[in-house]
Amino acid sequence: MDRRGFLALTGAAGLATLGLAGPAEAAGWHFYNRRIPEEAHKRMGKMAGSGITSFAFTPSNGWAMVTRNGGYFARNVPDEFFAKLKQLIAAGTRIHCVAFAPGGGWVITGDRAMFARNIPEECYQRIRAYYKAGQQVVNVAFPPAGGNRWVVVGTKTFYARNIDEECFQKMRELGRKQRVTQVAFTPAGGWTVVAGSAFFARRIDDECFRQMKRFSANGWPLHNVAFSPANNGWSLISRG
């Protein structure tokens, strides 16, 4: 379903005319996009000043983004996903992560609650176990091969099942020094791991990797990395 969303904007509207690359900045939040839907890029320019907490693509190149002050916008996402996102935000939940699985499933996590539909059962139970133990989930990622393959990143620990072995070992290695905050997978099987100010990537677009290094050199910690299923597109967003 074609969906729009609720916007709670704070001083970033002037960025809506930017092209499909960057870098761009809104109130200290930097982002850089390449070959993503033009509407997503323009919407990011309007919402970045509010602090984008999550931006993700569906397997069909739909997308959703959420800000820390309760703003959200989505295009071509499942009806139930959009309704549940709206419901959670209206109830006061601050959204940490939205993620879409290859088979059409999806998950929303926040500081107070979570909801998922049609994701691997073991992944769902792991997320629930984290919340029951008092640990919020800040990132969920699904490799493109589908099946019981996933990563769940909590505020203290992470758990992965059936992912690329090198990716898992890099999560462990980087996690010894800084907390792992995000993992992302490309449609072609590449991946990135972000842990605080450190990151590692394998088999991603060369320009994307160069921009990740540029963010680091400028002191812009990566907060969100997303890969589009179309046109080798990608998006980088820093913390404010």
Image (cartoon, rainbow, N blue to C red):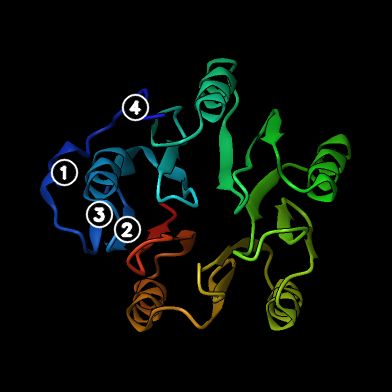
Q: Is residue 93 left or right of residue 207?
A: right
Q: Mark 4 points at which residue?
A: 4
Work out whether residue 186 or residue 131 is closer to the camera in this orientation and state it: 186
Residue contact at pointers 3 and 4, CB within 8 angstroms? no
SS of the residue under disc 3:
strand
Expressed as whole percent of the image width and height from the top left, the position of residue 144 reads 59, 64
Q: Which of marks 3 and 1 is nearer the N terminus?
A: 1
Label drawn at residue 16: 1
Residue at left offset 71%, top offset 59%: 151
- Residue 36's quadrant in the figure? bottom left
Work out whether residue 163 or residue 71 is closer to the camera in this orientation and state it: 163
SS of the residue under disc 2:
strand
Residue at left offset 50%, top offset 52%: 59
SS of the residue under disc 1:
helix
Which marked residue is nearer to the observer: mark 4 or mark 2? Answer: 4
Expressed as whole percent of the image width and height from the top left, the position of residue 127 reads 79, 44
Q: Which amino acid does label 4 sit on?
A: Arg
Label 3 Cα crowd, 10 Å radius (few <14 / some 14-19 / many 20+): some
Q: Name the residue under label 2.
A: 31
Q: Earlier in the sequence, mark 1 or mark 2?
A: 1
Q: Name the residue under label 3.
A: 25
Q: Earlier in the sequence, mark 3 or mark 4?
A: 4
Q: Earlier in the sequence, mark 1 or mark 4?
A: 4
Q: Which amino acid does label 3 sit on?
A: Glu
Alpha-carbon distance for marks 1 and 2? 13 Å
Q: Which quadrant does the N terminus fall into?
A: top left
Q: Is residue 138 above or below residue 36?
A: above
SS of the residue under disc 4:
loop
Q: Is residue 127 left or right of residue 239?
A: right
Alpha-carbon distance for marks 1 and 4? 16 Å
Residue contact at pointers 2 and 3, CB within 8 angstroms? yes
